[in-house]
Amino acid sequence: MLKINSSISFCFLILLSFQSCKNESSNCDIKGKWYFHQVNRNYKPTNTLEGGYFDFQNENTFKSNIFDETKSYNYSFSDDKITITTEEQLNFNLVRCTPDTLILAGEISAFYMNFLMTKTPVEQQLEEDAVDSDLQ
């Protein structure tokens, strides 16, 4: 009887761990302004989007300064996929999501793009790094 209960408990733990892994990515909160820290175009770093951001707002509204900054676009997010409806439909895969880091990958105008973004602008982070180095 103990062996059966142990087996059932083990199976339950395995199922629970798979379920919590699945929920970890689906609990990602992409809302807010995400600043580009590194952008790769066709697997090579590019500086052409330096100072860029993606802003995922409430009501599934999206803004970015790499498109018409005065316009709002619609977006949807489900199953680790983000679809943004600009002049062309953009499809991104969620590679990583933490409270302060977001990595997206997908195509824009026939280029494969990777975006490493954080909630802190690069300029502000550089200033904080300078202060930290002064303290050491």
Image (cartoon, rainbow, N blue to C red):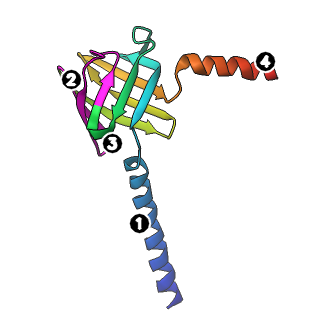
Q: Which circle, 4 or 1, is nearer the viewer?
A: 4
The reply to whether the C-beta atoms of the residues labelled 4 and 1 are less than 8 Å apart is: no
Specify the quadrant of the image occupied by residue 22. Answer: bottom left
Dot 2 and dot 4 residues touching (CB under 8 Å) = no
Q: Disc 1 to disc 2, how far (Cα)?
A: 40 Å
The residues tagged by marks 3 and 4 sit, at their Cα atoms, a distance apart of: 40 Å
Provide the residue span drawn in magenta.
62-87
Specify the amino acid type for callout 4. Asp
Q: Is residue 85 left or right of residue 6?
A: left
Instruction: Check the image and name the residue furthest to the top.
Output: 48
Q: Residues within 10 Å of mark 4 (few under 14, many from 20)?
A: few
Question: Which numbered marker is on residue 134?
Answer: 4
In the image, which is nearer the foreground, mark 3 or mark 4?
A: 4
Q: CA distance from mark 2 to mark 3?
A: 19 Å
- Mark 1 falls on what kind of element? helix
Residue at far right of view:
136
SS for dot 3: loop
Give the amino acid at mark 2.
Thr
Residue 15: give its label. 1
Is 68 inside the magenta-drawn segment? Answer: yes
Q: Which residue is mark 3?
A: 80
Q: For residue 68, which quarter of the picture?
A: top left
Mark-to-mark CA distance, 4 and 1: 49 Å
Mark 1 is surrounded, within 10 Å at the Cα level, by few (under 14), some (14 to 19) or many (20 or more) other residues, namely: few
